[in-house]
Amino acid sequence: MKDKPLANCEREFLLQLIERTKRLDDRRAFDYRNIKIEFGADYGCCHVHIGETLILAQVTCSMIEPKQTRPNEGALMINIEFNHVACPGFEPGRLSRKGVQINRLLERCLKECKCIDLESLCVIAEKQVWEVRVDVKVLNHAGNILDACSLAAISALAHFRRPDVTVSDGKVFIHPEDEKAYIPLSVHHMPICTSFSFFHSGKYLLFDASYEEERVMEGQMIIAMNKHREICALHMSGTHLLHKDQVKRCTNIAASKVMQLDELVHRALQNDKESRDRGDGPSSAELNTYTKIDVASKEVKKNLKLRPDVEKGVSSDDMGAGDSDRQVETGSDSDEQVDESDEQVNDSDEQVSAGGADEMDTVTDEHWSSEKAKIAELQATAEVGLGGQSTWGLLEQEVPLSEQTKMIARKRKSREKRKAKPPSSDSEEEETVTLSTPG
């Protein structure tokens, strides 16, 4: 089954969005989606989530005869399978051109860079060695499946345990786990793939492209690197040419991202080990690189900066015309909380942030829920002027026409009373409600 073709209007919309340094999920140019690594009940079983992309990796081992050219080394086999349910473009029982490319890149990344000590898999030279097989299955394709497959494969290899063996009189005895503890593989380093997508002849660059962004990209560069900043593989596809400065910039960004992913893998392995020692079963680890904020939350946060009375929780009726320009002092620490929430930015993302990309404000869920309740309470008690209902953002609710008519009538009646009343210098200044709009 072929993938559904992309409409011209959708393609133009995505390209125009990229030109404005925007993305569909509110990420910046070099932001990863939220990543989660979780292990199964058996050693060597690993699930990796990158956004909605889901990958399953399973490592198994068996005893085989070694190759004649390398009689004292084991073997590492990598197999990738695309589930036809994961994407309409995947055909069951057949590996597509993209699948062949990803399989070769994983072999270059894991086998040719020798991340696993194959000599430690030798049992009897020239007779029997261990063959480690990594089966990677794509369960859901939502973009950037190569990075997810690479992360799942290396995590499964680091989590895998092989049985212990005993050699006696030329015979090999494989011990079960209750007799002898399983032995982990000797992992020298962890190469992890990072993908960069290019648009408009290389003018715009995005990291961790989604499924929609991959369909309109013009080229791609894949860098496999470990935490020691050693490049294990480099692959480029597309018709456009890249300047050496662009390649160097992508390499620096990849080094920063690989450091984060390597730390995430080690943290997931440590959590799983501690959980199994306690008898709680397998565990997992997550990396939340960004907080997705909808349009309403960003609009309300902008209004909170403009309205000190809303931020402090003071009713609009309690403030005079001159009080709107005066800061209301209270004993609460809401200002400090808002300032702290504004400064919660990932340090590594600041170092590699895209030039010209809009910085996204992040709001914690607890602070956002409290401010939302305050705004809802204030809207219920605030008066409406002649110009119609107040516009504080996208949370306002439409006032029925009958209520608006009554409010306008009350305002007109109060204005007529003020005109009929003689002016007095000693009279107190009447309070007015000042409503400011964002912008």
Image (cartoon, grey):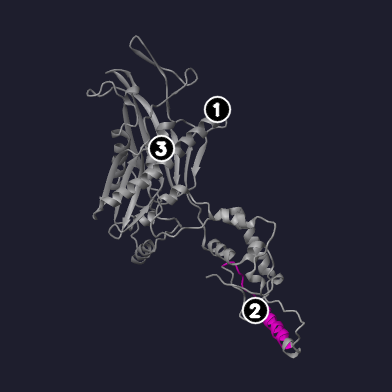
x and y percentages locating residue 231 in the rendered image: 31, 40
Whether tag 1 and tag 3 are in contact, CB under 8 A, the answer is no
Which comes sooner in the sequence, label 2 or label 1?
A: 1
Label 3 amino acid? Ala
Let me know if residue 1 appears in the view.
no
Q: Position of residue 15 (x, y in %)?
A: 35, 63
Q: Nearer the viewer, mark 3 or mark 2?
A: 2
Disc nearer the start of the sequence (1/3): 3
Image coordinates for residue 153, horizontal then vertical, percent: 39, 37
Q: Is residue 402 above or below residue 317?
A: below
Task: Name the residue rendered at 61%, 55% in the picture.
Answer: 336
Secondary structure category for the residue under label 1: helix
Quote the CA–CA distance across marks 2 and 1. Answer: 66 Å
Residue at the front extreme of this rendering: 425
Pick whichever, 135 or 261, lies toward us. 261
Amino acid type, residue under disc 2 in the picture: Gly
Judged from this view, the residue extending furthest toward the top is: 169
The main secondary structure of the magenta stretch is: helix
Which amino acid lies under the numbered mark 1 shown in the image of this protein? Asp
Select label 1 or label 3 by which is in front.
Answer: 1
The disc placed on residue 385 is: 2
Please, what secondary structure does the residue beneath circle 2 have?
Answer: loop
Q: Which label sits on residue 277? A: 1
* In the depicted structure, whether residue 264 falls above or below residue 32: above
